[in-house]
Amino acid sequence: MAISQTEACMGRIGGAERRLILRNGEIERFELQYAPFGAFELFDQLYGRGPAPQVRHVRDIVALGLVGGGMSSQAADDLIAAQPPEENLHLRALAQRLMGQTFLKLALGEDKKKEVGSAVGSPTE
C-alpha cells in the first residue's frame, strides 16, 4: 500500500516562505490544548460560519502547521510569538488556507478526480 505525502501549504511568515502541514498529531495537540473547542469549530469560524476566531487559536494552528512542516515546536512558538499584532489578519488568512489544504483540497482545486476528468456532474458519470 502506498502512503501519499501530505502536500504543504506555503506561507510567508517572518520574512520567509514557510512550509506548513497539519497532520493528525498537530490537530490532536490543538484539540487537547483547547478542549472542548476543536479543529472543526475553528475551521467553521475561519470560513465565516460562527463567531470570528480568537487570535490565540489562529496563531496556535499556524504554529502547529509549522511543526508539521518540519520546524521544532520551540522555533515555531518563537516565530509566531515574534509576529506583531498587525500580522494577525495575515496569519488568519494563512490559517484559513492551511485548514482548507488540510480538510478541503477541493477548495484549492486539488481534487485528483477533476484532474482525470471525472468531476461530479461530468458526462462520464
Image (cartoon, rainbow, N blue to C red):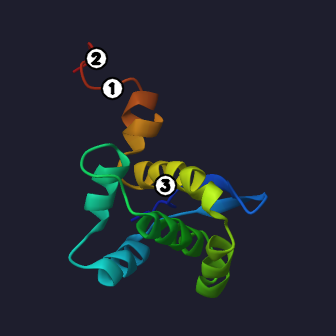
On the image, numbered disc 3 is attached to which residue? 98
Quadrant including the C terminus? top left
Question: Contact, CB < 8 Å: mark 3 with mark 1?
Answer: no
Judged by depth in the image, the label closer to the viewer, 3 or 1, is 3
For numbered disc 2, what is the local secondary structure? loop
* Percent position of residue 45, x then y: 31, 52
Please give the count of numbered marks on the rendered protein: 3
The residue carrying pointer 2 sits among few (fewer than 14), some (14 to 19) or many (20 or more) residues within 10 Å by Cα, namely few
The answer to which quarter of the image holds residue 75 is bottom right
Q: Amino acid at mark 2?
A: Ser
Q: In the rendered image of this protein, does residue 4 appear above or below residue 34? A: above
Q: In the rendered image of this protein, does residue 56 appear above or below residue 125? A: below
Q: In the rendered image of this protein, does residue 10 appear above or below residue 57? A: above
Depth check, front residue: 55 or 120: 55
Residue positioned 25% across, 71% down in the render = 37
Q: Amino acid at mark 3?
A: Leu
* Percent position of residue 65, x then y: 53, 67
On the image, numbered disc 2 is attached to which residue? 122
